[in-house]
Image: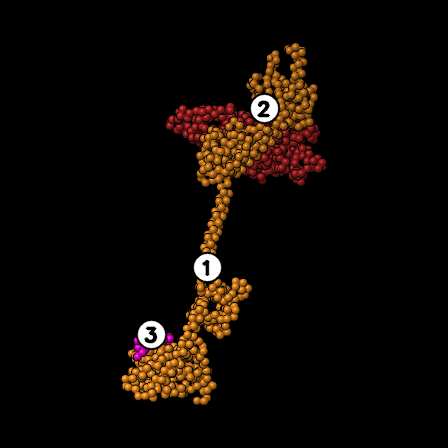
Chain colours: A orange, B red
Amino acid sequence: MPNLPDQALFSYIFQQANEACIVVSQDLIIQDINRKACQLISSGRDSLLGISLTSIECALQDIFFWDELNANPHLHISKVIESEWLTHNGTAIPIEKRVEGFQVENTQYWIIFAQDIRERNRIAQEQLSLSSQLQSSLEATAEGIMSIDQHGKLVNINRRLIEMWQLPEDLIVSGNPDAIMLHLQNSLDNADFLQKALSDINQDPEIETEITLQFKDGRYCVFNTKPEYLRDRLIGRVYSLRDITAMKKVEQDLVNALSLAEQAVQEKTFMLDALKMSESRLRRLINSSLIGICQGDMKGQLTLINDALVQLMGLTKADLIQYRLDWLTFTPIEFQQTHQTALQELKTKGQTAPFYAELIHKRGHNIPVMVGLAQLEGSEFEWVGFILDLTEQKKADRLKSEFISVVSHELRTPITSIRGAMSILEQGVAGELTPKALELVAIAHRNSKRLALLVNDILDMEKLLSGKMQFKSESFDLIQLAQQAIDTNATYASALQVSYQLAAHTRIHMVIGDAERTMQVFANLMSNAAKFSPKGEVVTIEISATQQHLRVEVKDKGPGIPAEFRNRIFSKFAQADGTNTRQQGGTGLGLAISKTIIEKMSGEIGFDSEVGKGSTFWFSLPRSHHTESSV
Amino acid sequence: MSDETKLIAIDQLRIGMFIKLDLNWFQHSFSMNSFKITNEQQMKELRALKLKHIRYIPSKSDLEVAPIKIDISNIPPLEAEAEKQVFDSIVEAKRARFEKLKKQREDIARCEEKFVKAAGVIRDINKSIFAKPAETIKEAGKLIDLIADGFVGASDNVMHLIQNAGSSEDVYFHNLNVSVLAMMLASEMKCDEEEVKQVGMAALFHDLGKTKIPDKVLLKVDGLSKAETDLLKLHTQYGVEIAAKVGLPKFVAEAMANHHEHMDGSGYPRQLKGDAISKITRIITIANVYDNLCNHPDPRQSITPHEALSSMYAHRRAQFDPVAMATMVKSLGVYPPGTLVRLSNEAIGLVMNVNVGKPLRPRVLVYDADIPKEDAMILDLADETADVAVSASIRPGALPKAIFEYLNPRKRVNYYAESKSKQAATTPTKAG
């Protein structure tokens, strides 16, 4: 037996031990129990000594535990098992017990060391649920996560990361972060980023990094690393990987869309520039042009006019802005009709032949112009007009006609005197001339007559063109006039051995116009016909009526008008055969004068001709309505 | 479940490692997907699986196996012959396992059949006891003989969980359960056959007095009033009266009278103590309490078999015959049939039966998502190595829905007992 001080000491230690201790005999009768154990089951030591352990132990497994222990008692082996102890108030508390055997003088004892594991169980339960929660969070997250401790050991890695990095099992097994990083590097397009980040981390283990990795297979991942701390101590680093391929794609699509849009804008700008350039070129062209150009609509409203026209009309830019420009307001009353006709023609044909008109200058005087209109391509309502200033030309024309007029007048007087003198000489009033001299005088007389005729025609023409010739507007009997004309010209015709014959196919006689001028036209046409008729032929003058007009036809059986000459037959100084002029006589002004006269009287003039068979010159004059009854 | 697993190369596998195969149960020769490697044969079979890596659980392994670099070329490749042997052994193991499973299913089906049949007989007995008492008692005797023949005197008895009993005979299941359990206890307590049968007879009729109690009291699920409780308690007295009337044996009448008496005198109606209560009645009492805890009239108030037994042992031990109590624990084990358990390999299962002699190594219906419910594996822990054991009981409410539906623990826990050897002896002659 141990001596007393020892026993007291051991007893003290036993009682003060922090672990619950119970000493039982082989038949599980409690021999001793310490303070901690008593506290645990809320009973006094005295009430427990001598009773069976089974009244404290209350877990089913205890029965099997002691059975087994008794069946083969390993005295020196301590066994650990969870059990339950019944407290004084009847509740069972979970404990973990460790049982060791020992022998004192052949008596077998068991010492039971027990720990209250309520707290431990609770913590374990909490840890279990926490860690399972963490684990499931770790697995459930869309991010790949890996954590590596300070010693470079792989601590945790979730399946997502394994999938994302396509880590082969060997590598995971190796648990070698360097090898894993190398594998990652090899699958990247931008491995240098990763290398840089890793070397940064190496230099400063406490930094956080975030880079975007570009995988060779086209994926993009955000690679984030953060130091991991336990309280203040750095214990490792967490690496996370987030797949942003989809996001990147959206981003890329956006960028693409943006650049497409930019390109479109650029193209548009380019086109606009080109347009602007072409427009300005056009504008320069238009504005530098000497021709006035304007654009207008069918109502005559002008939408654009060029500098040349602005200048021509004496306008300023301010006027253009200030006023709504109407073509008609610039058109003198006498040309308004012309203008309306032109617009009408424009509507039907899409363009007009150039026509003469006048515009009103800002200062009030008229400007002679040649106008051509054409519908604007692609538009039915707009047209473009070209206006050529004829002022200078008009001035030149006037100068010319004035010159002619002056010259003619100055010629007529001496020629009249010459003709008179010649006539007297020819008649022998100034004494008998020798036949030789008489012949010369006759030539001079004949030519002076022709010269006088020419001067008259030129004067007529000049009068007509300058508008100085006055026209009457009266009713007269056209058939009667035709008969007079035949009578008047008969002498001339008979000299050419040609005769005239009148055929009136209508009972209507009266027309409106100037009888004296009409007689001039008759004389011109009839003398022409006689002139070009073969000897002995008859020139017929036929008169017929149409709804509105009377028509006069003068038919000869001459050589006809050559085709190449027909379109300039009514021009000034026109004769088919220039060389024949002298032979045929005439000034070449007759038809031009006739045309002008007839048109001034609102009539028409024209011809039909067949080479070798003859020509028919015709003119028509408007019928007089109120004189019909007189017939 | 929370145990961290590690992948290791197959060449680093060691005996003592607790491994976890990521394979279907049918793809390997082992009984479980997770287990501790204990011998070289297992190593061979594992290598034969041709896996490159194997997951293992360091915390469950015998040693923290430091990865040793081994040149794989140094490991002699399995000879073709050896490989074939291993393969054959896998096939053989599989075949054997299927056979066993088939046998286990047959056992279950047979017990269910017997149970249902017996319940039917009990229904008839209860109906005709008043009209034809003598004949009925004789019939009851025959039933008890039949049940007793299944296991009495044998040393390899098995307590089966009856999963598919139907529900039409609910009322009579209690009598049958108490009879079977009590007879089993009696048998394990080395009572002679006559005594076992007396226990059976008495158990069969112990609640006969309840026929005089109105159904509205009997079937009431929420708390009874004092008067109702008093009325219900009268069933012991009524039982005695009926026993006298129909001529039931004296030991039956005694059980009817005293099956609510407790060893510590805390029972009713007469607060008898200890030896004042017959041994037969003491056995019936403990079986009766157990069944009432597991099969409360209100299923929501039922507790699991493990909880029932634990609570009886921890808190009500004094009320029961200590031998009967100890026998009951030793027969049913820590995790009686009907208990949901977690195994040391993290598998979850339902205890289907216990070998009464080896109650800590029960047969467990194991949840495996890869195996259809109908073909669910039944693991006989008696045949497994020591590392596969039940580690804890689980409350049904704590199970994920999928597992609960797979294992389908019934609200009622019914038992039927049988001897393996006796069954083997009787089955071929169809005399059972």
Give, as a three-letter code, the residue at label 1: Arg
Dot 3: element: helix
Q: Which residue is mark 2?
A: A81
In the image as oriented, which residue stretches furthest toward the right? B227
Identify the residue shown where x is 52% and y is 66%. Answer: A325
Residue type at mark 3 is: Phe
Query: From mark 2 to mark 1, how far is it between C-alphas?
Result: 109 Å
Instruction: Give x and y (percent) for residue A130.
Output: 58, 33
| Residue identified by numbered label 1 | A284
State the image coordinates of residue A51 (x, y, percent, origin top left). Answer: 66, 20
The magenta stretch spans residue B139: no
Expressed as whole percent of the image width and height from the top left, the position of residue B97 reads 47, 31
* Span shown in magenta: A562-583
Report helix, strand or loop for mark 1.
helix
| Label at residue A301 | none
Asked if A293 appears above or below A140 in the picture, the reply is below
Q: Which mark is residue A565?
A: 3
Is residue B191 in sight in this rendering?
no
The disc labelled 2 sits on which kind of residue? Answer: Ile
